[in-house]
Image: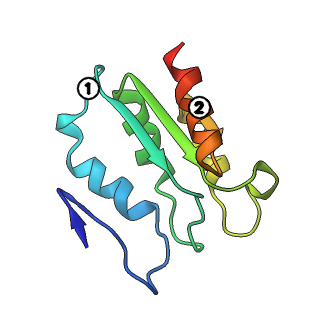
Amino acid sequence: MSYGELTVPTIGVYSDYGKPILEYKAKEGKLNKRTIMLWMGDARNNHLPSEEKIFKDLCGRVKKYYWLNSEAKSKWDSGDSVIGSYAPYVSELAEVTNTASLIKFLCELQN
């Protein structure tokens, strides 16, 4: 399934955050200090390369970079989670596990 330039994984496809990070790297010319990036996901990378250095570079090119993690904080950096690799570079990292927490994040962002 495809939405614009992004392809949505299908059943049986495991998360690989390095792949979309590399895709953003290919489009980095479109990123600038007016760009605000929003990433949503659990940061479970199935023990694949995190592409942390590229992620750090991308975050440095934009105005703000938000990561909304869909898992409870108590599960971050356990198992195959690589959120700790990305966390130092984002403007804000938030636990967003349901609609209420998403609305709360968006309301706080507005202020």
Q: Quadrant of residue 2?
A: bottom left
Q: Quadrant of the N terminus?
A: bottom left
Which label belongs to residue 78? none
Report x, y in % for residue 53. 46, 46
Along the viewing direction, whichever of 55 and 95 lies nearer the viewer: 95
Q: Quadrant of the C terminus?
A: top right
Q: Is residue 16 left or right of residue 6?
A: right
Q: Quadrant of residue 93?
A: top right
Which-is-in-front pick, marks 1 and 2?
2
What residue is disc 2 on? 105
What residue is disc 1 on? 32
Q: CA separation, marks 1 and 2?
A: 24 Å
68 is higher (above) or lower (below) than 74: above
Along the viewing direction, whichever of 47 and 74 lies nearer the viewer: 74
In the rendered structure, which amino acid carries the disc numbered 1? Asn
The residue depicted at 77 percent of the width and 58 percent of the height is 75
Could you tell me if the residues under marks 1 and 2 are in contact, i.e. CB atoms within 8 Å?
Answer: no
Q: Is residue 27 left or right of residue 81?
A: left
For the image, the number of numbered tags is 2
Which residue sits furthest bottom?
12
Report x, y in % for residue 78. 77, 63
